[in-house]
Amino acid sequence: MTTIEPKYKNFPLDQSKENSKESEIVLKVKDLKTYYPILGGIFKRTIGEVKAVDGVSFNLNKNETIGLVGESGCGKTTIANTILNFVPPTAGEIFLKGKKILEGRTTLHKKIRRKEILSKSKIIGPSFYMFYRIFDSILQDLELNLRYIKKKILNFSKKLSDIFRIQLERIVRLVSDIYLKERGLFTKKIRKKIQIVFQDPDSSLNPRWKIVDIIGEPLKILVRITKRKEIRRMVLKLLRTVSMKREHLDRYPHEFSGGQKQRITIARALACNPEILLLDEPTSALDVSVQAQILNLLKDLQNKFGFSYLFITHDLTVVQHIADRIKVMYLGKFVEEGTIDDVFNNPSHPYTKALLSARPTFDPEQKRNRIILEGDVPSPINPPSGCPFHPRCQEKDKHIGCGIEKPRRIKVEGGSGEHYIFCLPFKKEGKTSYEGWEFISD
Ligand code: SF4
């Protein structure tokens, strides 16, 4: 495999400023971080964090497919789960058509602390801040159970004397209102616009439900259609959209093949007329011939309805077939991004080069160019200093400061003009610094 040495050019670090017109952007992800807490000790306090997604930004345009590739555990699915508000973002912001739908817990807490909590402390008294801190620490550990915790505390308050009960109830209601108000950004209306297709159709379909009920569920919950006849009519229309028939309406999932089940999950995702589909390895559980059918179906649907896809996969051939742009991920960060032609014709990051060299090929000559990465993927709990890829990088000796400096976003010249890598400059004869390179600082 021949590789072209990349030419570098300075470029600002804000990855979300991609060459796309603001009006075309349907989804904007800005400096997103999602950390999973590690709980420990008697009180199950947070003692560490798994940095699943660590500062990624991108724009998804209308009628566009972005392929998100990387090995298992690099954070691809966590990005999708965060966009859907299945897991709360730790930091960063997500916008749908210019409207903020999610923001990181860090930003959220700062806002709460600075504005509302302090102003309310003045009204209620210093005890408010103390109760807030206790409530806040419980919520940080069990964030998704806000209503449950609120109910428990309110039940407990009934055992207290009136003076404490009234004070505690007031504080709990105020704090939970603040949280709910902020979380309320992600409404049902937004959930309708962003839908997901999961990897394994077997586990995403309820085996006890008929197809009409499975596809009809989002119609009931999100579109609020209640008449049975209307639901059947809509489900039939959706089934026909994915090339299935009327007789499939009253069958159960076990009566279908893998490809048909995946068509059903796609029909369910289309039920509430979304604009964005997050496709989390939708073809990896299928045979190659069925994979091609599903990919063609997805392409047809995109051409017909103008959907935007975030296509998560570890299969480079699939992404080359379906995506317009590609983002390569390693340990929670993007390492290379560009159009499909840019990245496949001129892979410039050492990790992308290794990934592409591992693709199966019919050319026996290519075996000689196979790049074998040493060691395992480091733990996202304690990622390596500097460039997270440096312990395995086959090119680190040619670059400066790999174990110390954070990689910079660098534009690769040529191609479409939208090709970037996250790396550090080459060593030059007699130079041990960034002399000759002008990087925008962090
Ligand atoms: S910054 Fe250094 S270690 Fe990281 S990818 Fe570039 S050359 Fe390799």
Image: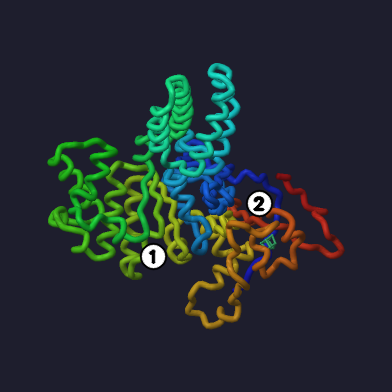
Relative to 223, residue 37 above or below: below
Mark pair 2, 1: CA separation: 31 Å
Point out residue 440 in the picture as x, y percentages from the top left corner: 72, 45
Residue drawn at (62%, 57%) of the image: 382
Q: Dot 2 lies on which element? A: strand
- Relative to 436, 237 lies left or right: left
Q: Residue flagged by tag 2: what amino acid is it?
A: Arg
Nearer-the-camera pick, 288 or 269:
269
Residue drawn at (54%, 21%) of the image: 120
Number of residues whose C-alpha sits closer than 10 Å to that of mark 1, classed few (under 14), some (14–19) or many (20 or more): some
Point out residue 86 in the picture as x, y percentages from the top left corner: 42, 46
Does label 2 point to a residue whose CB lies under 8 Å from ligand 1? no
Tag 2 and tag 1, C-beta contact below 8 Å: no
Query: Mark 2 = which residue?
Result: 409
Q: Residue flagged by tag 1: what amino acid is it?
A: Ser
- Relative to 222, 247 lies left or right: left
Query: Mark 1 = which residue?
Result: 284
The quadrant of the rendered image in which ligand 1 is seen is bottom right
Res 413 quadrant in image: bottom right
Res 415 quadrant in image: bottom right
